Amino acid sequence: MAAGAASGGSAKSDTYADARTWLLLPAWAVLGIFILTPVLMMLVYSFLTKEFRGGVIWELSFAAYDQFFCSRGLFGDEPCTVEWTYINIFWRSIWQAGAATLLSLVIGFPTAYFIATRPESVRPVWVFLITIPYWVNLLIRTVSMKFMLRDQGPLNDFLISTGLIDSPIHIVNTNFAVQLGLFYSYLPFMVLPIYASVERYNFNLSEAAADLYASKMTTLRRILLPAVKPGVIAGCILVFVPSLGSFLAPDLLGGAKNFMIGSLIEEQFKGNAGNWPFGAAASMILLSMVLVILMIFARQQAKAEKGAG
Amino acid sequence: MARGKYDIKAFPGFLPMTILCLVILYAPLAVVTIYSLNDSNSITNWEGVSFRWYADVFTGPESEKFKIAAWNSFTIAIIAATVSTTIATLAATAMVRGGRFKLRTVSFGLISLPLMVPEIVTAVATLIFFNSIGFTRGYLTILVAHIAFCIPFAYMPISARMQGIEDTYEQAAMDLYATKRQAFTKILMPLMLPGIISGYILAFIISLDDFIITNFVKGAGVETLPTAIFGSVKQGIKPNIMAISTMLLAVSIIMVTISYFVSKSDNTK
Amino acid sequence: MKTLLKTTATAMALALAANAASAEGKLVIYHWFEYIPQELLDKFSAEHGVEVVMDTYDSNESLLASLKAGAIGTYDVAVPGDYMVSIMAGEGMLDTIADGELANSGNIAPEWADPSFDPGRKHSIPYQWGSTSFSVNRDVYSGDINTTDILFNPPSELAGKINMLDSQGEVLAMASLHMGMPQCSNDREQLKALNAMLQEAKGNWASFNSDTAKEVLVSGDAAVGQIYDGFGAKAREEGANVEYAFPQQGYVVWMDNVVLLKDAPNRANALKFMDFLLEPENIAAVSNYARYGAGVSGVSEHLDPALATLPEANPPADAGAGVFIEVCNEETQAVYDTIWTNLKK
């Protein structure tokens, strides 16, 4: 029983197998035309020669990938050594996005759970309460967040007045500020999928576990978490992946002293550099990285289901 | 559930976490609201209370621009969220209830593709693509682009929810001679509702807030709220932006309140 | 669900109806964000019976990117900065204004009639000009500020409190002035020294930010901020005790220009608009709004008197020279791109 619930009866079900082509067709069509085609164009661009100040010349070239992985010195005439610049930028972005995802999970999971356990009639109100702030433009929210965190801002004033600290904590222009900003940008994307999962959770399972003298933490870990895993994974994907490419929070809250993936790529298309093939190559590397992570996830889930079935 | 004081659902510390979450969400908005009342041209200096920025929103030189931008933003967000949620629901049904099939992993990759490509890349690529097929930029290009990139945001909560519903309900209905279509609309859809609503809301706020892609594909003269706001703040953030934001908050709160009372009266019938 | 569908259908119908309404006489402007008063556009519309449509961009580079991606042929005029005019001309994106096509071309101020970025004004007319330097909070530092050392080798009071513009052109041009080297140097030793100097200077910088360059000065979050002169003036008017510097080593000057784009769908109206902006009274309205200088003769009587004495627009006699950002060739530019990436890696 528990195993069946944990795997969620998901992909095993083939109720609508005969209609699946028709069900998927709209998604395939829209995404195929308006997302996949542009992405494939970018893939092609990453193997073309760059045109000075933006644009491409239709000649095959690996220069973009060479630039990513090969360091050839300030003047580009030294032999190839490993280029750490872009790997570091990627690593930094992954780290920041990961920290923001963790922060969202730690605060978002209890919130989602709390909402899902309210009486049914007030649950929508709670859901809206979480999403109302997102009617305000991201830029304005981020600027306001920066205002809150300033050395002379309300947060520091409050902490000093309570006597918790003596001098202001310096938060703006630190990594923590970036994580906080990313967390603030994407929180509902963690809360809502988890809420949708927990709302469906059968609390009789927890009850049964408690009857068998399982502690609360054991119940949480062994029964509840596996059952709502799809929601947690969906939430993590929806926070982590957009965080990777985001640049508003890093720029405004982090001081933009170091490139993140998003600003690095933006600079290639909109900045002085105007190096479209390199921007395309960096996007493709990011894309394949994320794709691999997601595929591993999907595979593992499929395996777990097979094992449970 | 009569277990006396021992509540199986409650975890210690979850309520404080929820409160912390709400404080983090709303504290910066308090700043927005307070500074919308600032009687100064600046958002950083406080010069007393005034409603003049609210008047400015309706009668100032930018009022027409913001009115059209708000209209564009909301119609696009509503249409894009509706269409993408529908597409995502159908796709999730195939992915979660369609058995195993070869293209399943590929389809999942395709659905999550808009998430994985940095927005600026989608923006430039989409612009080049629209231009190469001779699609004139304007309201429609924004709408189409929004529908496409909203799909994964709608799909994720919907599919997560569907994975939590055993198919025994639909099977039982079909054993009782319900058609597949009836099993879908009468059994699965109602059970799916919280997931679909979550997906719809996420798609809606993603569309409402999008700047990068919109700015590239919008074409001359068509503005949405984010592009109009980003435009305005280039000359410094004035309190009129704070006033607009506060009014948006007020509208959303009013709508939520109304929908709450409507659904309440529905339930009591 | 049904109401939702109904709303959607209604919204769709209304949106399409709104799209269908378009007039015959049109002018499509591609303009900077928020830098022309709406009243002026309305005045042009009324005078010439032309419907004005405006689209906006946020940097010279994004203007170029968008036109490169295929947007050329949909706009009539754009307003690129000095160096971008020569880049766009080199890309063949500009149409030539023939002699006599502009009735008011004689109104162009003599000093702006033959600029280096558009010799003979073949493609453009002046729009607004100003400078990019930096402002210093006088409450924090009272010493001499008219030196680029403030940015690149700051006194201890200012170290760690500096906001730079997040713009490669402006930062590297200022750095070249500080080093006393040309903007497009091929000298390897000079370039290495520039790279090393920036790496060291970065340790004293708090942030790179263009969007809130004014706000951080007004709020006191930054004590020094690289900034455009008009924004420097606004920061001061909003109550910050800041002073705009004109460094001895020199500072960056810029000029935005109205250009006639290639394949302009409404070429005749574009020329009418350019003539309109060459009338002193009209271009003065832009200056009064944006607080920058106009490049048209006879404009002074229409200007807000405060502009004439604005400290940010009137360099002292002993100030260094103002220089335009230069356009380097591809090979040289690659080195500067690497230096910029090194700075932000």
Image (cartoon, helix red, strand yellow):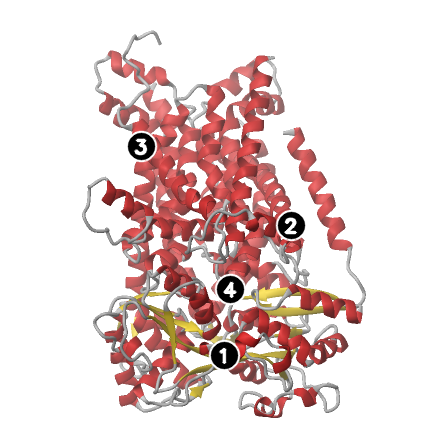
Q: Label 3 is found on which chain of the structure?
A: B
- Give neighbour class at mark 4: few <14, some 14-19, many 20+ (Cα, 10 Å): some
The residue where tag 2 is placed is B67
Distance of label 1 from label 3 (alpha carbons): 56 Å
First in sequence, mark 4 or 2: give its number: 2
Q: Amino acid at mark 1?
A: Thr
Q: Secondary structure at mark 4?
A: loop
Image quadrant of residue C266? bottom right
Which residue is denoted by mark 1 in the rendering? Answer: C309
Inter-mark Cα distance, 1 to 2: 38 Å
Q: Nearer the viewer, mark 4 or mark 3?
A: 4
Q: Are marks 4 and 1 on the same chain?
A: no
Q: Position of residue C105 (x, y in %)?
A: 69, 87
Identify which amino acid the numbered label 2 is placed on. Answer: Lys
Seen in the image, is B146 located left or right of residue A284?
A: right
Q: Which residue is mark 4?
A: B235
Q: Earlier in the sequence, mark 3 or mark 2?
A: 3
Q: Residue C239: percent from the left, percent from the top? A: 41, 63
Residue of label 3: B17
Query: Does C262 sit above or below residue B155?
Result: below
SS label for mark 1? loop
Q: Hey, what amino acid is under mark 4?
A: Gln
